[in-house]
Image (spheres, rainbow, N blue to C red):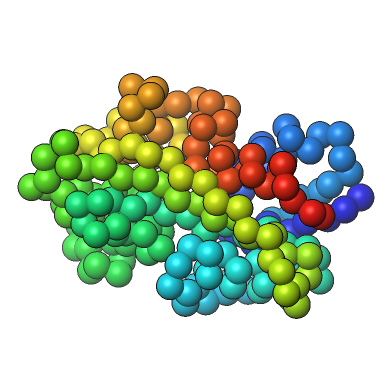
Amino acid sequence: MKKIVIASGNAGKLREFSAMFSSHFANEKIEVIPQNEFNVEEAEENGLSFVENAIIKARNAARQTGLPALADDSGIEVDAIQGAPGIYSARYASRAGYQGSESGDAANNAMLLQALADVPQAERSARFQCVLVYMRHAEDPTPQVFQGSWEGRIVVNPEGNEGFGYDPLFFVESENCTAAELSKEHKNRISHRGIAMQQLIKNIKL
């Protein structure tokens, strides 16, 4: 049984990865294990791009566990605010000094809506980005990189109860609903992470 550590502590991401791996690698002897089962200390994400941060996280997990590691770095880019929150999506509100009563995802969403308060619908284009990095070991000189983008726009009011993060604000034109109104299975097929995962499945060298 080949073991791969997932370099993430994000529960939403872990659920999506587990579902994707179980459906796409069902016939292969691969066990996907979250890094928290090894008490991996979180890496400092001090890169300036999604790919840099994903490499940092994958190398950190591989080094601490001795196993191949798969890391994800993802976030949302909003054109009207110069691509923010970008690599800081997970900590957007805390970095910006948000003063509201919300916390976590709710605070990030509230902060984004606040930043776009005067931006009309036609100018709220956005996209989710996902970069996956697979490292065979901590000193791997050729990390394998897979990337997916998912186009949409930011709505004025949150809609839907599925997903996590910015999903309630991200309207997908082709589906005529927000990402949070999609079933988990459908989202996993068409999302930024799903697209990056499809690239990984086709091209990964384990």
* Residue at x 72%, y 42% (from the top left corner): 202
Q: Is residue 118 above or below residue 188?
A: below
Say whether residue 126 is left or right of residue 3.
left
Residue 60 falls in image quadrant: bottom right
Left or right of residue 157, residue 21 in this image:
right
Which corner quadrant holds the C terminus? bottom right
Residue 139, percent from left and from top? 75, 77
- Asked whether the viewer can see residue 61, the reply is no
Q: Position of residue 204 (x, y in %)?
A: 74, 51
Task: Provide residue 137's location: percent of width, then percent of height.
Answer: 78, 70
Q: Is residue 177 above or below residue 21?
A: above
* Residue nearest the observer in this picture, 105 or 116: 116
Q: What is the quadrant of residue 107 in the picture?
A: bottom left
Q: Residue 56: which quarter of the image?
A: bottom right
* Closer to the camera in the image, 14 or 39: 14
Q: How many marks?
A: 0
Left or right: residue 98 versus residue 24 is left
The answer to whether residue 202 is seen in the rendering is yes
Q: Give the x, y percent position of residue 79.
A: 25, 51
- Residue at the extreme right: 1
Residue at left 53%, top 64%? 51
Q: Is residue 185 left or right of residue 126?
A: right
Please tell me which residue lies in front, 100 or 153: 153
- Residue at 73 percent across and 32 percent down: it is 23
157 to 196, vertically: above or below = above
**Residue visible at 43% across and 72% down?**
48
